Amino acid sequence: MDQPMSALAAMAQRRSIRSFQDRPISHELLEEVLAHTVLAPSAKNAQPWRMVVLEGERAAELARMMQTRADEMAEAGADSGSLAWTAQVVAQAPVTVVFYNAAPPPEVPARFHESYHWVMVQSTGAAIQNMCLAAEALGLGSLWICDILYVHDQVGPWLGHAEDDLVAAVSLGYAAESPGPRPRRPWQEVTEWHKHPAASRE
Ligand SMILES: Cc1cc2nc3c(=O)[nH]c(=O)nc-3n(C[C@H](O)[C@H](O)[C@H](O)COP(=O)(O)O)c2cc1C
């Protein structure tokens, strides 16, 4: 790639990818994605994100955990939404990165833990979006995955992060599909513009 893709182009072109080529990602490329992920802003620059990169058998184990949970829920007559579908994406992707929020440091009093959580989860969301956009700019497809929360209780101890907050996962790989843009409400429909009576946009 001669000219790096602009941020605006990455935002416009990124799609959720649910079908990946059987092609590994080089560690060099993955490290570049990770390096851009941690450039995200965070409250008080606390950088609460923690990432666990799963490849090969470790990623396959996560996919099995998710599929087993989907099967158990189906047997119990419970709705597991897109869980089984997402488990198939994880099974196919060469890499899945699990995102945690680090537990609050000891100096944060317990009464602030809930607001700390809300603030830090936004920070980690910014990092996840950076990862998806960096992947796009570097020629990779990505899928932001919250279906991993269905196996929250198992994944924590399995990855040695039982004390931290599981936020989401991102599957990465070379896309084997090129979906068109998914619908969006126009910004005008979701935005209120409170103008000062005297203000003019001219
Ligand atoms: C917080 C969050 C959680 C998501 N979780 C899942 C998921 O578990 N499985 C899945 O297939 N897609 C998941 N997605 C992808 C959305 O379905 C997708 O972003 C949306 O349909 C718009 O499509 P686009 O990303 O191609 O624009 C998630 C996206 C976000 C932002």
Image (cartoon, grey):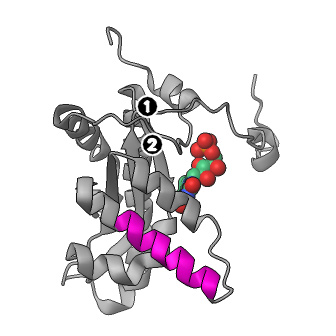
Q: Name the residue under label 1.
A: 136
Percent coordinates x, y for residue 70 in the rendering: 55, 75
Nearer-N-terminus badge (1/2)? 1
Q: How far apart are marks 1 and 2 (CA)?
A: 8 Å
Compared across the picture, whether 128 is left or right of 28 comes to: right
Residue at coordinates 45% horizontally, 39% vertically from top-left? 20
Residue at coordinates 24% horizontally, 32% vertically from top-left? 29
Q: How many labels does the image show?
A: 2
Image quarter of the C terminus: top right
Q: Quadrant of residue 52?
A: bottom left
* Residue 164 in view (yes/no): no
Compared across the picture, whether 74 is left or right of 142 comes to: right
Overall secondary structure of the magenta section: helix
Q: Mark 2 points at which residue?
A: 142
Percent coordinates x, y for residue 141 in the rendering: 45, 36
Q: In which quarter of the image is residue 164?
A: bottom left
Question: Where are the magenta residues, as a range?
Answer: 62-75
Q: Nearer the viewer, residue 164 or 154?
A: 154
Residue farthest toward the top in the current orientation of the protein: 2
- Examine the structure image and report whether residue 15 is included in the region drawn in magenta: no
Residue at coordinates 27% horizontally, 47% vertically from top-left? 38
Q: Give the structural element (helix, strand or loop) at label 2.
A: strand
Q: How crowded is mark 2: few (under 14 residues within 10 Å), some or many (20 or more)?
A: many
Percent coordinates x, y for residue 151 in the rendering: 43, 77
Q: Nearer the viewer, residue 101 or 72?
A: 72
* Residue 98 in view (yes/no): yes
Query: Is 109 above or below relative to 119?
Result: below
Q: Label 2 sits on what residue type?
A: Ser
Q: Give the structural element (helix, strand or loop) at label 1.
A: helix
- Examine the structure image and report whether residue 66 is included in the region drawn in magenta: yes
Q: Are marks 1 and 2 in contact (CB under 8 Å)?
A: yes
